[in-house]
Image: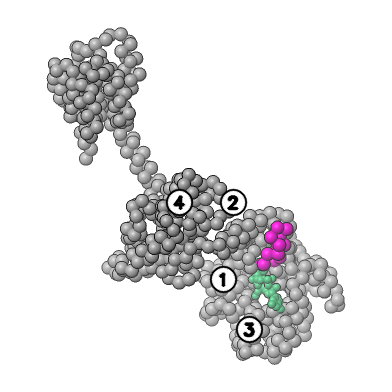
Amino acid sequence: MALPATLLIVDDDDGVRALLDSALRDVEATRALHADMLSAQKYVEDGGRVDVALVDKNLPDGTGAQFIGWLRQHVPAAEAVLMTAQTSIDSAVEAMKAGACDYVRKPFDDLSQLRMRVCDALEKVALKRSQTLLMEKLWHEALHDPLTGLANRTAFLDRLRTSLDELRRNPDRLYAVLFIDIDRFKHVNDNLGHQEGDKLIATIGQRIAAAVRETDVVARLDGDEFTVLLREIEQPTDAARVAERIHQSFTEPIRVGGREIFTTCSIGAALSNDPRDPDSASSVAFAEAMLRNADLAMYRAKRGGKSATHFFDAEMQARAQRSWQLESSLHEALKNGEISVAYQPIMALPERRLAGFEALVRWRSPTLGQVAPLELVAIAEECGLIDAVFEHVLDTAVHQLRAWQQQLGESALSMSVNLSSKQLSGAHFVERVLAHLHAAEVPASALELEITESALMDDPERARGILEGLRDAGVRLSIDDFGTGYSSLSHLSRLPVSSLKIDRSFVMDAAAANIVGFVVDLARHLHLHVVAEGVEKEMELESLLAHGCGFAQGYYFSKPLAADAMSAWLATRR
Ligand code: C2E
Ligand code: MG
Ligand code: MG
């Protein structure tokens, strides 16, 4: 409950104080009476409450205006009313200048008028106080995570930024950011249900906060991600020690939903003296870079196994820099025509007849040199450009196919284009594919889309929608790098695919010949084609023929070639 308001009355006239004391009795406020400025100031300094002060114009040890000025500085929320015997307008001006909200004239001819003025001032204060409370509440909510009461991402980045500002003035200081992620939290959350998962998160937040010093900043960024800003550590090992304490705080099980849950966490650490981009000169960019570095280090810790800590290091720095460069170059590359397509022929066995091509993306950057397709694909996936890359490759490839079909008079030739796992959920995907085919006047049956086994098996049910849409439109689908993932046979038989591409690792390994045989048998049962990838040697081809493999591609026939070079290759075969 809110404390009652207090009226502070400062007047050296005993009679006036007594009169006010009784006249304001039925105003809802307690009264504090003082005869001079010093004692009133002492009252305030000792923590006495003031909402409205009624102050005489002339005090024995100063003027009312002086006291009001002092009060407004020390208790900004309070209001003051000046009491004066003067009748001129000057007293009103004087009162306002001192910071009073009102003035009353002495002697008090009309007490009800006085009470009204005092009540108005009290109301004003109450309104101001409730506005301040509301602002404080909103402010708190804007900067805190409601579940744990810890700082949120905004507040954390802000504190980190101001700390890094201090670093400019005191370059010898060292700060660290720890990025903490709960191991297998998704699994726990799914099993416990979200409500219990929330309790778990709240308890973990408390434990992390208890493992660090009060002056350190603990935040929950999102989901099961926490961060700690360690201010003013002496050396990197101090950060390692704190990380160890945090790991230790996970050893005790956490009771939620009547169960004891054992969890661990992975921690990534970044230091304020880590090597960094010249781009991160401003404190804002520096703060974001430190957080990102700690995040990257956390991923490394995750890969290293449970309960691990990893520090951001120079190698990670180089890698981060490269992906940042790649990402910023990729946008331009798509516009400037730096992204091209290489084609590798796919041959039908046993007669070694040309059946089609696989389109493989190529990127030669003027600044970064040749970028490997897998690296390009990973970056494009990360920065949301994978569809743009895919559509560029698809469009180029189907137009090229049309040209070759006409040139060779072979309308049965097909084109295979690789799909990324990130593309299996996009809206209107099927329509966009068909639009490219239509533009190139190539029938859907001439297109085959390849998707890797691991991408398919990650979430076969999610992929099914798009795959069925493609199949219904007449586009064929194949499983790439078959044998390297963990296909479940039941899924395999239900997915709308038409061929399996046996990974090169089985083709080149003589000891794996029985695997090739097994895949060919499996494919025959499921009415699928089999394409062997990466055939380099005569011997490998003979083994494939012996097993009855239907198609093959590889350096043995031709390396992937640019369109011109492939046209020349096609011409020599005729
Ligand atoms: P993939 O789809 O399995 O493509 C076959 C890879 O094996 C190609 O590598 C090809 O150049 C290489 N290769 C072909 N024959 C031989 C051979 O006889 N010996 C050896 N050692 N290698 C051979 P590349 O072009 O570097 O592509 C690597 C991977 O990048 C591809 O594997 C595919 O997964 C991905 N990729 C390529 N282009 C695209 C694309 O446009 N989109 C997507 N999403 N992924 C692509
Ligand atoms: Mg492929
Ligand atoms: Mg492959």
Between disc 3 and disc 2, the foreground one is 2
Give the residue at x 49% y 49%. Answer: 171
Magenta run includes residue 427: no
x, y (%) of residue 402?
78, 67
- Residue located beneath label 1 in the image: 455
x, y (%) of residue 566?
80, 71
- Residue located beneath label 3 in the image: 506
- Residue located beneath label 4 in the image: 173
Residue type at numbered disc 4: Arg
The image shows residue 133, relative to residue 457, as above or below, that is above
- Is residue 500 among the parts visible in the rendering? no
Horizontal side, residue 297 vs residue 371: left or right: left
Horizontal side, residue 98 vs residue 543: left or right: left
Residue type at numbered disc 2: Pro
Q: Earlier in the sequence, mark 1 or mark 4?
A: 4
Q: Quadrant of residue 367?
A: bottom right
Give the residue at x 62% y 60%. Answer: 322
Residue bounds of the magenta highlight: 361-373
Q: Quadrant of the N terminus?
A: top left
Q: Earlier in the sequence, mark 1 or mark 2?
A: 2
Q: Earlier in the sequence, mark 1 or mark 3?
A: 1
- Residue located beneath label 2 in the image: 278
Q: Earlier in the sequence, mark 3 or mark 4?
A: 4
Q: Earlier in the sequence, mark 3 or mark 2?
A: 2
The image shows residue 136, relative to residue 305, as above or below, that is above
SS state under label 2: helix
